[in-house]
Amino acid sequence: MNHIEIIDVKERVEALNEQNAADVRAYIKRKKVYLVNVMSSPGAGKTTTLVRTINGLKEKWRIAVMEADVDSSVDARTIQVLTGAKVIQLHTGGSCHMDAGMTMEGLMTMGIDDVDVVFLENVGNLVCPAEFDVGADLRVEILSVPEGDDKPLKYPLMFRRADVVIENKMDAIKVFDYDPAKAEERIRALNPDCVFFAISALNGEGFSSWIDYLNYKIAEKLK
């Protein structure tokens, strides 16, 4: 009987990505850059949140954005027009996430000698981006009110690995069946150290605390 060799491709992919993520961390440390990986479902408000966030930080820090999408450059143009930040568009070629190798390529192509902070707006979904470490200093998950407070039960890995959860669209909370206390309880059961911010990217509610937190985290690394 012939022997059939079995190769665990996923393990090899994960091991390669872990090494690439370590390379990204070393690179941004050497360049003195703070990297934020922003993740969410499609339509949760990543781009609108980023616009208001960048405008709240740009007087103090030099900011760049890597926009990751399967196709199009709509969000990149929006960021560029509304913030003036340095922007690069990354097309993932059908892939549902960014990995560390793609992130390094984006950083090197864009050039980060003239920036302090880079935001990576990851591809919109709650599965693949959670599985791939991109070497970021901060992993941010945006959970919007219309999605429901049961989202952490359906996609636990994303919330387990997030450093920060931003509850967005709080201006619409009266319209939807969303309980912030339930959402936080469910997330803390997965991730006791997670930091929470309740905001409205539309009207700016809650942004002062979020901006203060980011300023502290950036300064802590770059001091």
Image (spheres, grey):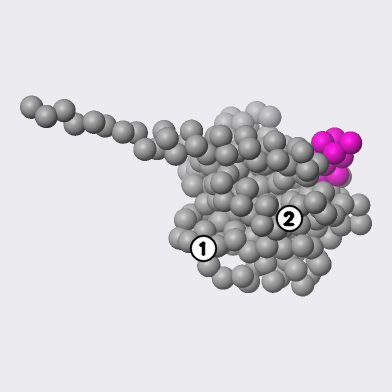
Mark on residue 70? 1
Going 40% across and 37% down the picture, which residue do you hit?
10
Residue type at the position of mark 1: Val
> Which residue occupies the extreme left position in the image?
1
> Which residue occupies the extreme right position in the image?
59
On the question of residue 53 being in view, the answer is no
Q: Which of 192 and 90 is in front in this view?
A: 90
Residue 85, image quadrant: bottom right
Q: Which element is circle 2 on? A: loop
Q: Is residue 116 magenta?
A: no
Residue 30 shown left or right of residue 40 in the figure: right
Mark on residue 111? 2
Going 75% across and 68% down the picture, which residue do you hit?
80
Against 202, residue 108 (above or below) is: above
* Residue 67: % across, % down: 64, 60
Residue 146, image quadrant: bottom right
* Residue 148: % across, % down: 56, 51
Number of numbered tags placed on the structure image: 2
Against 33, residue 77 (above or below) is: below
Magenta-tinted stretch? 214-223
Residue type at the position of mark 2: Gly
